[in-house]
Amino acid sequence: MGLKTSTLPFNERIAAAAQDQFAHASIAKAQDTQYDKREKARAELGHWQDWRKLGQSIRQHVLQYLPDYLEEFSDNVEKRGGHVFFAQTTEEANHFILDVIKQQNGHHVVKSKSMVTAELDLDKKLQALPDVSVLETDLAEFILQEDDWDEPSHIVFPAIHKDRNQVHTIFQKLGYTGDNDPKHMARFARQYLRERFLEADIGITGCNFAIADSGIINLDTNEGNADLADSIPATQIVVMGMERLVPSMKEAEIMDNLLARSAVGQKLTTYVTFEGQQSVGESDGPANFYVVILDNQRSQALGTEFQEILQCIRCGACLNVCPVYRQIGGHGYGSLYPGPVGAVLSPILGGYEQFGELPFASSLCAACTETCPVLIPLHNLLIKHREVETDRLKMMHGFTDLQMKMVGKGTASPFMFNTILRFKHLGLAPWTHQRPMSVTNFFAYGGAMITNGPGMVSGWTDVRDLPAPPKHQDDFRVWFKQHKQQRGDTK
Amino acid sequence: MKVSIFTTCMMDLISPQVGKDMVEVLERLGCTVDVPEKQICCGQPTFNSGYVEASWPVMHNQIDALAAIDCDYIVCSAGSCTAIMKEYPTLLADDPTDPNGQYMAQAKILAAKMYEFSQFIWRVLGIADCGAELTTVATYHRSCHMTRLLGERETPFWLLENVKGLEVRQLAGIQYCCGFGGTFSVKESAISELMVTAKVSHAEATGAAVLISCDPGCLMNIGGRFNRLGKPIKIMHLAEVLNQNVDERRIRKVSEVPTPAPAPFP
Ligand code: SF4
């Protein structure tokens, strides 16, 4: 579907996610497994905090000189005989890609995993072409394709929401007769895919890092499918976001290290590939090499308070630590880019109208900021989005807006706050009920609870009980005044 | 040693007992405690919701109020509010209503004096054993802001280790947020519900009778969910724990010099 992966409104997506027991269990298990692997891989490297700083400085440097590096990269691709196309929009990118396929008389497209092609909704466009077949060859993407193009729910593990039994059912439709052992199923997929690779004439891949000073690209994968996609077909089309560059191989090595350890908890991915236009004397590689560099609103973030999100290397670690992602999964976010990175990036790429809720779908626990290998202050960027929506675009309306403004006034004025302290107990009395309490020592005044509070408080009491506030005479400050007198202070 | 209490709006509105226990513990440990009168709130409810313009006056009031009383240290009952007040100097750099940087200058002074309750006892007073006794099985919930934004992971555990009779069991999934998140709990209650329910299950699985934390907001959230589900637990702020059955002879210092507070995101 492109950037937006659901037509349901936000609250319905959350409700659906809450119901999905399979996804829940799969995601929690994957997060926990990744936690151990990631922390171990990072510890093995040592000096992790210094590596992060180095990663950050490389990415910031590239962003600072982005036009120069883009020019250098594209010059070098062309020097090697390849072609570069700068696409401002997804339409331009799709148009160019479809044109190349036509020109090259392509009929069998094999794709390796690429979030940017998903952003383009390229699979749909390819399916619409007569006499062109398209096949996702990343195992997880392949599963999604065979499940009637289900939407990905993670940027590194797109089928994280499916368990082995679901995969088993999907593969049975393809003629698989074995059991639900992942190894057996993977072997089946491998065989199935291999036959299709051999007839492919167009390979479409993503790009982890484009190497500016040599005009080649760097791919990190664990399945080897990208290597087949870039070496068997005569034509390769690389699709990348405009920010995914490094100056040279030296920086690529560092970034690959940060990426593999953060994304999959490995020292390096099984395949670390550097490739480009086949040059004279080389026996493999694409004879026709195209790179599509997509802007799609990324440049809007340059030079703004949101620039740091362009440092992202799509490792997915922030999703893997996120307690909100753990509960609502990728589909809950309704964006191709879910989790903390998605909550920051989606409104930039797709606008606040479509993705305005996402920056609020965070408790600001900062687990994302703590893990990000390139030191993006994710939780602060979420607050920035909230500020833009609230203060600058005035998107908040109605009673909630009014109440928040009152909270602002009430917490800025000692006079008003004192009044609130005086009347809080009485003011909430209509909503306060004596209730049997299972929790002891729970602040609750006289064992009373607010169970269906007014206004914004209802958001709280929909889910949990609220202790009734104390009478003014029992407030801390009143107690302290008496305490001070007893202590014998003269004041 | 003169100590000002940073009360937090939550303690004023909902949980006065936490404040009383804090004062009693600190006085017992030799501090002269005062409560600056005009203080209200650190500004997180509005700031973190995107009402940034409305938050500057809240922060200014807080700075004025705390600066009005002469003190050596400011001690707070919540890790989260401590963390944001330490962040004030960074936040106020964007404050258009403080063109001459007066508030910013004050904020820097206050930030340097600011400690969360457990941090203060361990790192400034150098006290390991407050002489408390509580015979029960407990588990400890770490708040995200205290852990990550303030960088304090250890002091509550060290202090709990010295509470006589107390067994502290490790909470599984301790790194996950309980779903409080200030206004998040109200605005995104459906997501918050899933998060706090997961936390309740983890706490239950420890078999602990008491849930302890250094952040009243988290306690109110997790406790509120326990109560809604009709499940039993006792909720205690660390200050309440350290004020149980105290034997003053047991109070023990570990160091005379303050140990530096950790950096955020260590
Ligand atoms: S924001 Fe950071 S942690 Fe998240 S995907 Fe990007 S690089 Fe990884």
Image: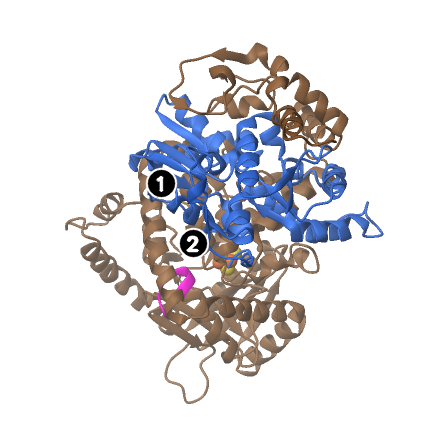
Chain colours: A brown, B blue
Which class describes the residues within 10 Å of circle 1: few (<14), some (14-19), or many (20+)?
A: many
Chain letter of mark 2 equals A
Q: Kindly indicate the quadrant of the structure image that contains residue B204.
A: top left
Chain letter of mark 1 equals B
For disc 1, the marked residue is B164
Give the residue type that dot 2 points to. Answer: Pro
- Please determine if labels 2 and 1 lie on a single subunit: no
Residue, x 57% and y 32% (percent of image)?
A: B19
Residue at the far right in the pictured view: B100
Q: Which quadrant does the C terminus of chain A fall into? A: top right
> Nearer the observer, disc 2 or disc 1?
1
Q: Main secondary structure of the magenta part?
A: loop
What number is the disc on residue B196? none
Judged left or right of residue A417, residue B206 is: left
Badges 2 and 1: C-beta atoms under 8 Å apart? no
Q: Nearer the viewer, residue A80 or B10?
A: B10
Q: For the image shown, how many numbered marks are present on the structure?
A: 2
For disc 2, the marked residue is A130
Q: Is residue A391 above or below residue A453?
A: below
Q: Kindly indicate the quadrant of the structure image that contains residue B258.
A: bottom right
Range shown magenta: A261-268
Q: Position of residue A137 (x, y in %)?
A: 34, 60
